[in-house]
Protein backbone atom coordinates (compact mmCIF):
# COMPACT_ATOMS: atom_id res chain seq x y z
CA UNK A 1 0.00 0.00 0.00
CA UNK A 2 1.24 3.47 -0.88
CA UNK A 3 1.21 6.03 1.91
CA UNK A 4 1.36 9.78 1.33
CA UNK A 5 2.14 12.32 4.04
CA UNK A 6 3.62 15.75 4.59
CA UNK A 7 6.66 15.94 6.84
CA UNK A 8 8.21 18.67 9.01
CA UNK A 9 10.79 19.56 6.34
CA UNK A 10 8.07 20.86 3.96
CA UNK A 11 8.12 17.75 1.81
CA UNK A 12 5.52 15.38 0.48
CA UNK A 13 6.68 11.86 1.31
CA UNK A 14 5.43 8.86 -0.67
CA UNK A 15 6.24 5.51 0.96
CA UNK A 16 5.87 2.11 -0.67
CA UNK A 17 5.39 -1.14 1.25
CA UNK A 18 7.85 -4.03 0.84
CA UNK A 19 6.11 -5.66 -2.17
CA UNK A 20 5.83 -2.33 -3.96
CA UNK A 21 9.40 -1.45 -3.03
CA UNK A 22 10.64 -4.70 -4.58
CA UNK A 23 8.85 -4.01 -7.87
CA UNK A 24 9.74 -0.31 -8.01
CA UNK A 25 13.32 -0.66 -6.68
CA UNK A 26 12.59 2.29 -4.38
CA UNK A 27 11.19 2.55 -0.85
CA UNK A 28 10.37 6.22 -0.54
CA UNK A 29 10.18 9.49 -2.48
CA UNK A 30 10.58 12.85 -0.76
CA UNK A 31 9.40 15.79 -2.83
CA UNK A 32 9.91 19.34 -1.54
CA UNK A 33 6.61 21.21 -1.78
CA UNK A 34 8.21 24.04 -3.77
CA UNK A 35 9.08 21.55 -6.54
CA UNK A 36 5.43 20.64 -7.22
CA UNK A 37 4.11 22.55 -10.24
CA UNK A 38 0.70 20.85 -10.47
CA UNK A 39 -1.30 17.83 -9.37
CA UNK A 40 -3.60 16.04 -11.79
CA UNK A 41 -6.23 13.35 -11.28
CA UNK A 42 -6.82 12.91 -15.02
CA UNK A 43 -6.18 9.52 -16.60
CA UNK A 44 -2.42 9.18 -16.89
CA UNK A 45 -0.70 8.07 -20.07
CA UNK A 46 2.45 5.98 -20.00
CA UNK A 47 5.48 7.68 -21.51
CA UNK A 48 7.53 6.03 -24.20
CA UNK A 49 10.43 4.46 -22.44
CA UNK A 50 14.09 4.76 -23.28
CA UNK A 51 15.50 3.14 -20.14
CA UNK A 52 14.03 1.83 -16.91
CA UNK A 53 15.00 0.74 -13.42
CA UNK A 54 12.05 -1.21 -12.11
CA UNK A 55 9.27 -3.34 -13.55
CA UNK A 56 7.30 -2.83 -16.75
CA UNK A 57 4.74 -5.17 -18.26
CA UNK A 58 3.10 -4.31 -21.58
CA UNK A 59 -0.51 -3.10 -21.41
CA UNK A 60 -0.30 -1.62 -17.98
CA UNK A 61 1.88 -2.28 -14.98
CA UNK A 62 4.75 0.12 -14.44
CA UNK A 63 6.77 0.42 -11.24
CA UNK A 64 10.00 2.31 -10.77
CA UNK A 65 12.14 4.95 -12.45
CA UNK A 66 11.78 5.50 -16.19
CA UNK A 67 13.89 7.78 -18.36
CA UNK A 68 11.91 9.33 -21.21
CA UNK A 69 12.37 12.09 -23.78
CA UNK A 70 10.62 14.43 -21.35
CA UNK A 71 12.88 13.56 -18.41
CA UNK A 72 13.02 11.11 -15.55
CA UNK A 73 9.67 9.88 -14.17
CA UNK A 74 8.56 7.61 -11.34
CA UNK A 75 5.57 5.31 -11.86
CA UNK A 76 3.70 2.88 -9.65
CA UNK A 77 0.64 2.04 -11.74
CA UNK A 78 -1.54 -0.92 -12.66
CA UNK A 79 -4.59 1.02 -13.85
CA UNK A 80 -3.85 4.37 -15.49
CA UNK A 81 -7.42 5.56 -14.88
CA UNK A 82 -6.82 5.49 -11.08
CA UNK A 83 -3.72 7.68 -10.94
CA UNK A 84 -2.60 10.94 -9.45
CA UNK A 85 0.21 12.72 -11.28
CA UNK A 86 2.54 15.21 -9.65
CA UNK A 87 4.27 17.45 -12.21
CA UNK A 88 7.59 18.66 -10.81
CA UNK A 89 10.30 21.23 -11.52
CA UNK A 90 13.81 21.36 -10.13
CA UNK A 91 13.59 17.80 -8.82
CA UNK A 92 15.27 14.57 -9.88
CA UNK A 93 11.91 13.49 -11.39
CA UNK A 94 9.89 15.55 -13.86
CA UNK A 95 6.76 13.70 -12.78
CA UNK A 96 5.52 11.10 -10.31
CA UNK A 97 2.53 8.93 -11.24
CA UNK A 98 0.98 6.73 -8.56
CA UNK A 99 -2.16 4.63 -8.46
CA UNK A 100 -4.49 5.34 -5.55
CA UNK A 101 -7.90 4.12 -4.40
CA UNK A 102 -9.62 7.51 -4.64
CA UNK A 103 -7.77 9.76 -7.05
CA UNK A 104 -9.99 12.83 -6.58
CA UNK A 105 -9.69 12.75 -2.78
CA UNK A 106 -5.95 12.06 -2.93
CA UNK A 107 -5.36 14.91 -5.40
CA UNK A 108 -7.33 17.28 -3.16
CA UNK A 109 -5.40 16.11 -0.07
CA UNK A 110 -2.10 16.69 -1.89
CA UNK A 111 -3.20 20.19 -2.91
CA UNK A 112 -4.07 20.92 0.73
CA UNK A 113 -0.64 19.64 1.83
CA UNK A 114 0.97 22.19 -0.51
CA UNK A 115 -0.84 25.01 1.28
CA UNK A 116 0.16 23.92 4.82
Image: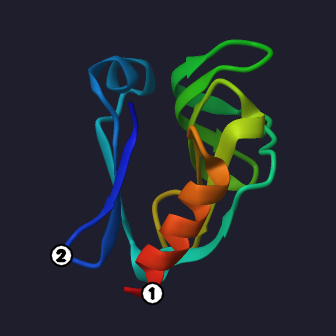
Q: CA distance from mark 2 to mark 1?
A: 13 Å
- Say few, some or many: other residues with alpha carbon within 10 Å of mark 1 (under 14 / 14 to 19 / 20 or more): few
Please tell me which residue lies in front, 82 or 69.
Answer: 82
The quadrant of the rendering that contains the N terminus is top left
* Residue 42 figure quarter: bottom right
Q: Is residue 58 left or right of residue 13?
A: right
Which numbered circle lies on residue 96? Answer: none
Tell me what residue is drawn at x 45 percent, y 87 percent.
115
Tell me what residue is drawn at x 62 percent, y 42 percent.
67
Which numbered circle lies on residue 8? Answer: 2
Please tell me which residue lies in front, 69 or 106.
Answer: 106
Residue with the mark numbered 1: 115
The spot of residue 51 in percent (x, y) is 62, 31
Work out whether residue 94 can be spotted.
Answer: no
The spot of residue 58 in percent (x, y) is 76, 13
- Say few, some or many: other residues with alpha carbon within 10 Å of mark 2 (under 14 / 14 to 19 / 20 or more): few
Q: Is residue 27 left or right of residue 98?
A: left
Element on which disc 2 rests: loop
The quadrant of the rendering that contains the C terminus is bottom left
Tell me what residue is drawn at x 65 percent, y 20 percent.
61
Which sits earlier in the primary sequence, circle 2 or circle 1? 2
The spot of residue 92 in percent (x, y) is 46, 60
Element on which disc 1 rests: helix
Tally the numbered discs.
2
Q: Is residue 10 left or right of residue 74?
A: left
In this rendering, the answer to whether 83 lies above or below 10 is above
Amino acid sequence: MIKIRADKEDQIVITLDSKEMFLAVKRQLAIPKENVVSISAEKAKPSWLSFKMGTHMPNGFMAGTFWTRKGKAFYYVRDFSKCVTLHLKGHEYSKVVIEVDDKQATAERLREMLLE
